[in-house]
Image (cartoon, rainbow, N blue to C red):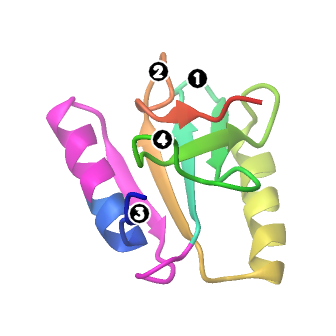
Amino acid sequence: MTPRLKSRLWVEALLRRCQIEGKFGAVLQKGAEEAGAVFVVVNHLDGGHDVLCPPPGPALNEEGERWFIKQFASPAPWPQVQEWLARQKKFDADFWVVEVEDRTGLAGLLLARH
């Protein structure tokens, strides 16, 4: 079994990859460095945002890469994203929020198969 990368290191790697690909990325909220959940907000720069969350159950695929599920069926406006994040904070405030600007994709992240 592949060891899970600490959340802080995974976030740093994501931001570095975004920088290399010419995408802007930033940490909006820092969580637990070791094992905090990571939510990625993909800003499509058209008013729509996809929120990518860890899936229920295993959060890693067979190759040890994190995968995600979409919180909303279609891109949501920023106020809706903020409202959802505020509700999450009531349950557990120890999570990461990373925003990545990507007009056409999901910042290269993998979606879990259902």
Which quadrant does the N terminus fall into?
Answer: bottom left
Q: Amino acid at mark 2?
A: Arg
Report helix, strand or loop for mark 1: loop
Lower position in the chain sequence, tag 2 or tag 1: 1
Q: Which residues are magenta?
A: 13-36
- The mark found on residue 27 in the picture is 3
Q: Amino acid at mark 3?
A: Val
User: Which class describes the residues within 10 Å of circle 1: few (<14), some (14-19), or many (20+)?
Assistant: few
* Residue in the image at 38% along x and 58% along y: 2
Question: Percent from the top left, x then y, of residue 91?
Answer: 82, 80
Lower position in the chain sequence, tag 2 or tag 3: 3
Q: Amino acid at mark 1?
A: Asp
Q: Nearest the camera: 54 or 100? A: 54
Mark 2 or 1: the one toward you: 2
Mark 4 or 1: the one toward you: 4
Residue at mark 1 to residue at mark 3: CA–CA distance: 20 Å
Q: Nearest the camera: 108 or 48? A: 108
Q: Can the viewer see residue 51 in this picture?
A: no
Give the total of numbered labels.
4
